[in-house]
Structures are given as structure tokens and as C-alpha cells.
Image (tube, grey):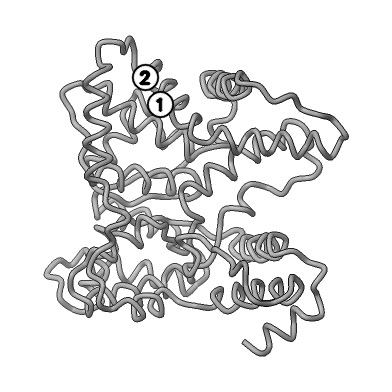
């Protein structure tokens, strides 16, 4: 920590936000050209079992051999998201959890995506900036990667007993200290926890099913259902859009009149852009999540299960920013069926068969 403090004492003209962004940009540049392959918890578990010599399936050992080769050759890395972390923390056996975390640390290169809500906020801000002042923004891919220690986000120390200048040094030094922290370090600090109650989705699933049933008669088509989902999520993030617009106007000396119609206008603009398909790749997290939920709602005999919400968040992370996604059969079918076609829209290979995953990985070694 001493070195971090010394470093930042000499650079106190840089804000914590600027510092975090610079670390993310450097990280994204380091992984440029590598294949990002996202594994859901099923694949992490089978790889862990193979690494412990506990698997009885030859394909698991072959998969492990291939992912290690690809990672060690610098061809691919296997990032995680907060959903991976939450499902890992649900494992009751601490020893297995720790062994899985060691494997994740190795194969992920210590890299994760920023949390789901942060990605949506970043994407919304990026779309607005890109439409008005594209010369002032970084590529979206530079803003979504972080280290596993920040997989749940980073909240800097605030309202400390120190003056503002010292507090800023502390914030940046602490961020740098955590930047080097591994997933295994995090797991070891929380060895008595066998679950992640804050990431439990039972109540949310019940709420969604109740509302889906209530409004099922109003659904006219899958596409309309999708756009309704888009609008519903945007309502939760309209403050982000308003804040971005206000800051941009402020920089230009323009006063933005605040009124009750502002949120509706923003939602309608984004909804129309998604309808036309012009921003699906620019704001993929919302697109993937909305299409997954719409597919379930349109299949009126199907109810959302708590684990579906984990699955949809995995899918949003994978399809938005990775080259391939290895998952379970049911989710693979949902993502690749004709009406969703999310694998084609976002250019991400989605596979569930272990034999197909092996064949895909082998092509990367050729």
C-alpha cells in the first residue's frame, strides 16, 4: 500500500473516476486480440471436477486441457461476471469453492465484466455521447472490463476524517490495492459464507410471473413484448440518461428545462432505436436481457424461475462482450431460436454440447 500512496501523492490532479477509467482502458488494450470465452457455472464446475481428477467423463479432461492451452498461449481468456461470483458463493463446500476460484483466477486472467446495472448505465451514456459528441468518448469495449476484485463494483471510501486531497489519495491507492486482489483472496475472506442472499431472485421471479400473467392478454406479438421489456427497464435507468444529457448541455452553456415528459421522451427515443435495430450492438446488455424475458413472456405457459434471472444475466454478459458462450441446453436453445437469434445479432457462438465446445476450442488452436 505504501507504494500506491506514494504514487498517487504525486498525481493528485487526477480524479478517482479518471483513474478507474485509465485502468480499465489499459486492461482492455492488454486483452485486445484475445478470444473472450464466457462459461456459465455448469462449465466451471465440470472443469473444476476435472482439475481435481474427480470427473468420470473424458470430455471434461479434454476441455480442461484445451482451455489451459488456449489461456497459456495467450489466445483466449475466460472472464466472469457478478452472476458467476454469486453462483460460486452458493456452493456449500468451501474447499470446492476455493478450488473453483483458483481455476477461475488462472483462466480468467483475473478479468471480469463490470456489474450488470453499471453496464446498462455505461451503455446508455455511451449511446447518447456517441450520437452528439463522438470525438470525446472511448470505445465501449474499453469501459466494461475490470478485475475480479471489482466484479460487484467499487465504492471508494468517502466522508473520511481526512481532508479532500488525502481522501482522494486513499481512494485511488485502495482501488489499486484491490485491483491486484484475486478471486481466491475474496473467497478466503468469506469462507464461512455458503450463499449470497443479496443475489437471491425468488421474490423477483414471483413478482415477474404475477405481472406477466396479469398483462398476458395485452401481448400482441413477440416483437411488441420485447419493446415493452425495453421500455420497462429504461424506466429504471432514465435518471442516468437525464444526467448525461444535463452534463453535456452544461458543458455547452445550455439550460435544459426539466419536466415530467423528459423521461418519456428518452424512453421513446431508445425504444424506437431498438425497434429499428440501430443500437442493439451499442447497448447489448439491455437488448439481450429484454429478448430473453420477452421470449418467456411470449411463451405464455412458461413461468420465470429464479435461476432464469441468473441465466439471462450470464447471457447478457456473454453475448454483449464475448466471442463464445458455453452454457446449458435450455438457455442455448432460447438464445439461438429464430425469434431471438441473439447469437447472430451479437456475433457470439453459443454452445451447450461439450463435444461442440471442444471442436470450437480446437479451431482456435489451429
- C-alpha separation, residue under disc 1 versus residue under disc 2: 6 Å
Please determine whether, in this image, residue 311 is positioned above or below residue 18: above
Residue 97 screen position, x and y as percent = 26, 73
Closest to the observer: 133 or 2?
A: 2
Q: Secondary structure at mark 2?
A: helix
State which quadrant residue 223 falls in.
top left
Residue lying at 80% horizontally and 75% vertically, measured from the top left: 11
Q: Quadrant of residue 288?
A: top left
> Are circles 1 and 2 on residues that touch, CB within 8 Å?
yes
Q: Position of residue 107 (x, y in %)?
A: 41, 70
x, y percent for residue 287: 46, 33
Whether residue 345 is visible here, answered yes or no, is: no
Q: Label 1 belongs to which residue?
A: 229
The reply, left or right, for residue 33 in relation to residue 295 is right
- Of the 4 image quadrants, the one containing the C terminus is bottom left
Q: Quadrant of the N terminus?
A: bottom right
Q: Residue 157 bears which disc, if any?
A: none
Q: Is residue 341 in sight in this rendering?
A: yes
Look at 65% across and 35% down and name the residue there.
127
Say what secondary structure mark 1 lies in.
Answer: helix
Q: Residues within 10 Å of mark 1 (few under 14, many from 20)?
A: many
Q: Which residue is at the front of the view, 151 or 257?
A: 257
Which label was assigned to residue 225? 2
Residue 210 image position (x, y, % from top left): 22, 27
Please tell me whether residue 342 is drawn above or below residue 262 in the rendered image. Answer: below
Amino acid at each position: 500500500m505504501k507504494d500506491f500512496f506514494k504514487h498517487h501523492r504525486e498525481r493528485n490532479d487526477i480524479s478517482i473516476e479518471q483513474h478507474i477509467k485509465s485502468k480499465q482502458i489499459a486492461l482492455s488494450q492488454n486483452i485486445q486480440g484475445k478470444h473472450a470465452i464466457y462459461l456459465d457455472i455448469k462449465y466451471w464446475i465440470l472443469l473444476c471436477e476435472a482439475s481435481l481428477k474427480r470427473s468420470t467423463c473424458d470430455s471434461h479432461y479434454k476441455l480442461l486441457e484445451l482451455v489451459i492451452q488456449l489461456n497459456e498461449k495467450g489466445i483466449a481468456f475466460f472472464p466472469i461476471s457478478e452472476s458467476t461470483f454469486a453462483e460460486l458463493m452458493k456452493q456449500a463446500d468451501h474447499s470446492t469453492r476455493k478450488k473453483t476460484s483458483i481455476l477461475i483466477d488462472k483462466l480468467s486472467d483475473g478479468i471480469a465484466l463490470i456489474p450488470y446495472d453499471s453496464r446498462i448505465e455505461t451503455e446508455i451514456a455511451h449511446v447518447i455521447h456517441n450520437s452528439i459528441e463522438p470525438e470525446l468518448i472511448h470505445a465501449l469495449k474499453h469501459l466494461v472490463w475490470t478485475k475480479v476484485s471489482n466484479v460487484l463494483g467499487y465504492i471508494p471510501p468517502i466522508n473520511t476524517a481526512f481532508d479532500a486531497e488525502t481522501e482522494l489519495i486513499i481512494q485511488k491507492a485502495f482501488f489499486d490495492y484491490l485491483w491486484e486482489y484475486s478471486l481466491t483472496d475474496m473467497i478466503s475472506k468469506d469462507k464461512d459464507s455458503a450463499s449470497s442472499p443479496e443475489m437471491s431472485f425468488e421474490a423477483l421471479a414471483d413478482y415477474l410471473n404475477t405481472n406477466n400473467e396479469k398483462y398476458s392478454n395485452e401481448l400482441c406479438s413477440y416483437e411488441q413484448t420485447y419493446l415493452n421489456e425495453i421500455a420497462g427497464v429504461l424506466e429504471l435507468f432514465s435518471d442516468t440518461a437525464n444526467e448525461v444529457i444535463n452534463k453535456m448541455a452544461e458543458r455547452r452553456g445550455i439550460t435544459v428545462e426539466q419536466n415530467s415528459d423528459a423521461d418519456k421522451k428518452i424512453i421513446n427515443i431508445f425504444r424506437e432505436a431498438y425497434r429499428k435495430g440501430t443500437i442493439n450492438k451499442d447497448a447489448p446488455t439491455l437488448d439481450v436481457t429484454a429478448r430473453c424475458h420477452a421470449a418467456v413472456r411470449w411463451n405464455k405457459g412458461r413461468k420465470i424461475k429464479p435461476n432464469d434471472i441468473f441465466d439471462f444475466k450470464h447471457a447478457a454478459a456473454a453475448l454483449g462482450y464475448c466471442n463464445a458462450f458455453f452454457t446449458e441446453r435450455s438457455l442455448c436453445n432460447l438464445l439461438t431460436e429464430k425469434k431471438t437469434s441473439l447469437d447472430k445479432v451479437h456475433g457470439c457462438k453459443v454452445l451447450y454440447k461439450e463435444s461442440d465446445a471442444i471442436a470450437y476450442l480446437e479451431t482456435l488452436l489451429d
